[in-house]
Image (tube, grey):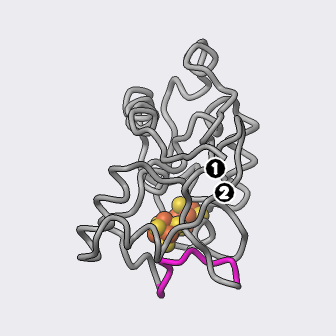
Amino acid sequence: MSSLPGSPVSYEELYKEPFYGDGLRFSCTRCSACCRYESGFVFLSKKDVFILAAALQMEYNKVIETYCRWVPGTMRAEWLSLKETAEYDCIFWKDGCSVYEGRPIQCRTFPFWSSILVSPDAWSRTAVFCPGMGSGRLYTKDEIELWVSRQRAESLISRNI
Ligand code: SF4
Ligand code: SF4
């Protein structure tokens, strides 16, 4: 679900000769496919948790305790992700994203993730389940790379195991 953590895609690889030089079209149709039905991970930065805490009017640690889980990852570390329901819906899905204004950076930057932008194939494979990709608003190369840099600027929360 994510280029994070441990993305194999370096800045150099991504920006060498980007296939999205003329921009890419994307407008979310709110179909909910990326929030529901399949198990996945929404990894979180400290800023994400602070924003969620403010939106939910909860303490930082209470947000982690109530809405988050630790996911085993690489380098003997666990990464903080949102919980999901038994039906594999995001814990915040309630007939729409119940924290839309405060949704995590991973959600806000989709589909402009380095793992999706690495090749036209990766973009097309993701677009199979996202009807918003390839139509609607045209994002320029600079706008796309701004989203990538915004995501990379936020360190994700992890702990050693
Ligand atoms: S899958 Fe795409 S179109 Fe559907 S809600 Fe997610 S981003 Fe929007
Ligand atoms: S936080 Fe909101 S946008 Fe992100 S996966 Fe959950 S329901 Fe979807």
Residue stretch in magenta: 87-95
Three-letter code, disc 1: Glu
> Residue 161 colored magenta?
no
The overriding secondary structure of the stretch rendered in magenta is: loop
Residue name at image x 52 percent, y 39 percent: 24
Question: For mark 2, does the 10 Å Cα neighbourhood hold few (<14), some (14 to 19), or many (20 or more) residues?
Answer: some
Between 16 and 75, the one lying in front of the other is 75
Give how far across and how far down residue 28 sits, in percent: 48, 62
Disc 2 under 8 Å from ligand 2? The reply is: no
> Residue 90 colored magenta?
yes
Residue name at image x 57 percent, y 74 percent: 90
Res 78 label = 1
Residue name at image x 72 percent, y 45 percent: 124
Asked if 114 appears above or below 133 in the picture, the reply is above
Residue denoted by label 2: 71
Visible residue check, residue 109:
yes
Give how far across and how far down residue 47 sits, in percent: 33, 50
Visible residue check, residue 29:
no
Mark 2: secondary structure: strand
Q: Is residue 57 left or right of residue 27?
A: left
Question: For mark 1, does the 10 Å Cα neighbourhood hold few (<14), some (14 to 19), or many (20 or more) residues?
Answer: some
Asked if 90 appears above or below 104 in the picture, the reply is below
Residue name at image x 29 percent, y 58 percent: 50
Q: Is residue 49 left or right of residue 116?
A: left
Question: Which quadrant holds residue 77?
Answer: top right
Whether residues under marks 2 and 1 lie with C-beta atoms below 8 angstroms apart, the answer is yes
Disc 1 under 8 Å from ligand 2? The reply is: no
